[in-house]
Image (cartoon, grey):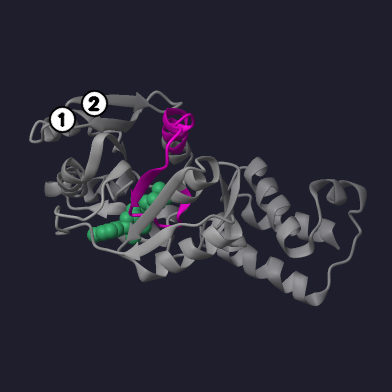
Amino acid sequence: MIKQIQQKFHQELKDLFPEKEINTFLYLLLEKIANLSRLDLVLFPDKKLDEKQISQFEKALHRLKNHEPIQYIIGETEFYGLKFIVNKNVLIPRPETEELVDWIIKDFQNFSDDFSILDIGTGSGCIAISLASKLKKADISAWDISAKALKTAKENAEINKVKINFQQKNILGISANFNKKYEVIVSNPPYIRELEKKEMQSNVLAHEPHLALFVKDDDALLFYREILKFAEKNLTKNGKLYFEINEYLPEEMKELIREFKVKKYEFKKDIFGKYRMMKIQF
Ligand SMILES: C[S@@+](CC[C@H](N)C(=O)[O-])C[C@H]1O[C@@H](n2cnc3c(N)ncnc32)[C@H](O)[C@@H]1O
């Protein structure tokens, strides 16, 4: 019965998570495993589950105790109102990245000509795919070094019925002499320093791909430098480069862009008032 599952989850997770969060886990799992809503839990608490469903709940409970993010357990998440498949090969898209996407959409929604966008380090494809869903005139390419991430990103593009040109590429050491120009280059590259690890939640550290997250303490802006070099040569005349940035490093970003012929730049804070985004024009 579903009420027994509910009791068991609360009993076994109460020392690990707040009650509200346990309820959220339950609602998401009920929907995914048994196609039932939170209202069903109230109206039909005695509803029976079959053996397969009970075993799926048991497995999910075990994974939650192991601090695995619920998004990996149910295998999906929502980003910018769209559904995305997620697994251990891709970072779980974050709300601050939705703000970055929103910034680009607002800047380009009235653009009347066709234009092209490049998303560097696409992961689940969340940035490229959300942009494609709103900016119909955009021709969008997306790169990642990880073949496994790209496989998931391609599935996400199919689910969301958009066309993206995905390519496996390593941005470090890519030649700046490229044969295409973009109106927009966007990137949320790896930017967390090893020294920030100790303040991170254990569920992120243990389960999310380190390739997507970490950089060395002594060269934290490595990806930004390489992307700036590339963008300086491969943006159109009025093209724009958008970055998600490390909230602790806006000053270092200012310092870095002095190495380039930057015409204009702008920082943007997220809803929590932290410097999280940047727009640069050459
Ligand atoms: C912070 S994640 C961002 C993922 C996604 N764009 C998002 O916003 O959720 C960084 C991504 O960069 C990719 N990446 C790491 N090193 C790379 C490299 N040298 N070249 C290209 N992509 C790389 C990782 O595989 C990961 O998918």
Q: Are marks 1 and 2 in contact (CB under 8 Å)?
A: yes
From the viewer's perspective, tell me whether residue 60 is left or right of residue 98: right
Magenta segment, which residues? 101-126
Task: Name which quarter of the figure residue 53 lies in.
Answer: bottom right
The quadrant in which residue 51 appears is bottom right
Structural crowding at the residue carrying mark 2, measured as other residues with C-alpha within 10 Å and reported as few (<14), some (14–19) or many (≥20): some
Looking at the image, residue 192 sits to the left or right of residue 43; the answer is left
Q: Is residue 212 visible?
A: no
- Image coordinates for residue 55, horizontal then vertical, percent: 72, 73
Q: Is residue 63 visible?
A: yes
Q: Residue furthest front?
A: 113
Q: Which residue is mark 1?
A: 262
Q: Secondary structure at mark 2?
A: strand
- In reply to whether residue 104 is colored magenta, the answer given is yes
Q: Residue at x 52, y 43 (%)?
A: 136
Number of dots carrying numbers: 2
Label 1 is placed on what type of residue?
A: Val
Amino acid at circle 2: Tyr
Q: Quadrant of ligand 1?
A: bottom left
